[in-house]
Image (cartoon, helix red, strand yellow):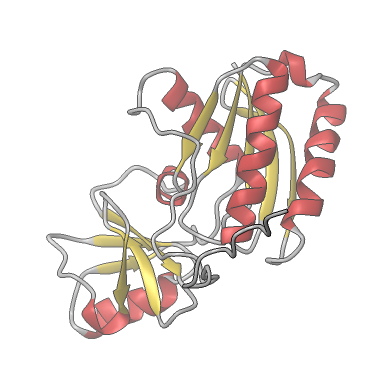
């Protein structure tokens, strides 16, 4: 299966082409700005390196969040366009799923902690992600491995209260892992997940409270 993985949910933007689980070509750009302008050229670059066309793709996978509003929207728009143009299926994957896939198999419970930049973290403890304050982290039912860009802060709080916690190196998704998780989803090994934004907090932009003024008559 030839899968294209796209990620712009956190600070690193990456695109990868993976054939039967093995990366064929991959590009990554550090930094949280410029997602919209960087993604399309990166896709063109990996396809050119592998000498394949978009029509050759068997599937496209994209991270749906939680993370950057701008990055998630840009990645999803591109992924939907590529899937539609190539006629291949599209799989959504969460940041938590991708970071968990980057870890070796073990007995620890994997927590994914994403910086919400609002004094809290988006925390996925193996189910639905929610926003929590660092001082209100839930209790763990066993040994934990923490992933995500807020992993250092969360692991420090857990260790300070005596929890058995391992700070992992999985901080930001890699597009090759996005593609691998997406391939498993399309094969039916994971439950379906629509390629739609996974937002925990509402957008900061607010519509005006008053309604639109009626159009003039005449």
**Residue, x 39% and y 60% (percent of image)?**
200
Q: Residue furthest left?
A: 141
Q: Nearer the viewer, residue 206 or 19?
A: 206
**Residue, x 44% and y 56% (percent of image)?**
199
Residue 73 screen position, x and y as percent: 61, 50
Residue 153 screen position, x and y as percent: 40, 79
Residue 187 screen position, x and y as percent: 43, 17
- Total number of numbered discs in the rendering: 0
Q: Quadrant of residue 61?
A: top right
**Residue, x 25% and y 54% (percent of image)?**
108
**In the shown orientation, is residue 184 left or right of residue 51?**
left
Residue 83 higher or lower than 207, as above or below: above
**In the shown orientation, is residue 211 left or right of residue 81?**
left
**In the shown orientation, is residue 19 left or right of residue 162?**
right
Residue 72 screen position, x and y as percent: 58, 52
Residue 186 higher or lower than 79, as above or below: above
Q: Residue furthest front?
A: 218
Quadrant of image for the N terminus: top right
Q: Nearer the viewer, residue 99 or 76?
A: 76
Q: Nearer the viewer, residue 210 or 143?
A: 210
Residue 83 higher or lower than 55, as above or below: below
**In the shown orientation, is residue 123 left or right of residue 42?**
left
**Residue, x 68% and y 66% (percent of image)?**
32
């Amino acid at each position: 299966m030839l899968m294209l993985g796209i990620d712009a949910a956190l600070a690193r933007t990456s695109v990868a082409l993976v054939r039967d689980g093995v990366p064929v070509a991959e590009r990554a750009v550090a930094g949280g700005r410029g997602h919209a302008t960087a993604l399309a050229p990166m896709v063109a670059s990996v396809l050119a390196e592998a000498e394949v066309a978009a029509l050759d793709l068997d599937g496209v996978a994209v991270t749906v969040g939680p993370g950057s509003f701008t990055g998630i929207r840009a990645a999803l728009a591109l992924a939907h366009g590529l899937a539609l143009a190539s006629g291949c299926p599209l799989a959504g994957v969460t940041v938590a799923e991708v970071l968990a896939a980057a870890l070796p198999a073990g007995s620890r419970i994997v927590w994914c902690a994403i910086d919400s930049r609002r004094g809290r973290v988006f925390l996925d403890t193996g189910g639905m992600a929610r926003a929590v304050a660092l001082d209100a982290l839930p209790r763990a039912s066993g040994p934990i491995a923490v992933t995500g860009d807020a992993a250092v802060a969360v692991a420090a709080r857990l260790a300070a209260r005596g929890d058995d916690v391992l700070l992992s190196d999985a901080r930001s998704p890699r597009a090759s892992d996005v593609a691998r998780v997406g391939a498993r989803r399309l094969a039916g090994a994971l439950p379906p997940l629509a390629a739609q934004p996974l937002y925990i907090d509402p957008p900061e932009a607010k519509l005006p409270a008053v309604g639109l003024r009626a159009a003039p008559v005449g």
